[in-house]
Image (cartoon, rainbow, N blue to C red):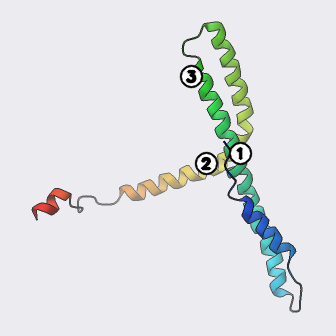
Amino acid sequence: MFKQNPFGDPIRNHVRVLLSIKWSFPYIPQLIQSIVLPIVIGVLSILYITIGIASQIVSMFLNMIRDAQSAMVNVTSVEKSGYVVAIGIYCIMLSPFWLLQFPLWALGKLYESIWSKEKDDIDISAVKTSEEISVG
């Protein structure tokens, strides 16, 4: 059900490199490395939480909501009320994880809207179809 988080191994590797820094004169390269690596580890940790763990939790809750919705098809109204309460609880439990992912989702939508506008500007009239190519 759960996939391996793609950010786990790079975090472990960078921590291992950070802990194995050998300090020798001149200290400038080691100082730069010891400043940059925690920043990289921090970024990977944020991605680990938002993209790795939270996305799996969100997809699990969304699947539970969809299953409850599909189970409501041919049942009595009393049973439907139980499913509605369950869906409400799932939505409440889903909301913190969704809020955690919302900034990255919004950036993705913004990028997608900008990218799709650039793709729509391409002139397709210059492209020949296979029939035009075979005719000559």
**Residue farthest along the left direction in this orientation:** 135
Q: Residue at x 73, y 30 (%)?
A: 92
Tell me the distance, in whole angstroms, between the alpha carbons under discs 3 and 1.
24 Å
Lower sequence index among marks 1 and 2: 1
Between 77 and 106, the residue placed more toward the observer is: 77
Q: Is residue 24 above or below residue 89?
A: below
Residue type, numbered disc 2: Trp
Lower sequence index among marks 3 and 1: 1
Secondary structure under tag 3 reads helix
Judged left or right of residue 35, residue 78 is left
Q: Residue at x 67, y 37 (%)?
A: 60
Quadrant in which the C terminus is drawn: bottom left
Residue type, numbered disc 3: Ser
Task: Tell me where residue 101 appears, x and y as whole percent.
Answer: 68, 46
Tell me the distance, in whole angstroms, between the alpha carbons under discs 1 and 2.
12 Å
Can you tell which mark lies on residue 70? Answer: 3
Judged left or right of residue 73, residue 32 is right
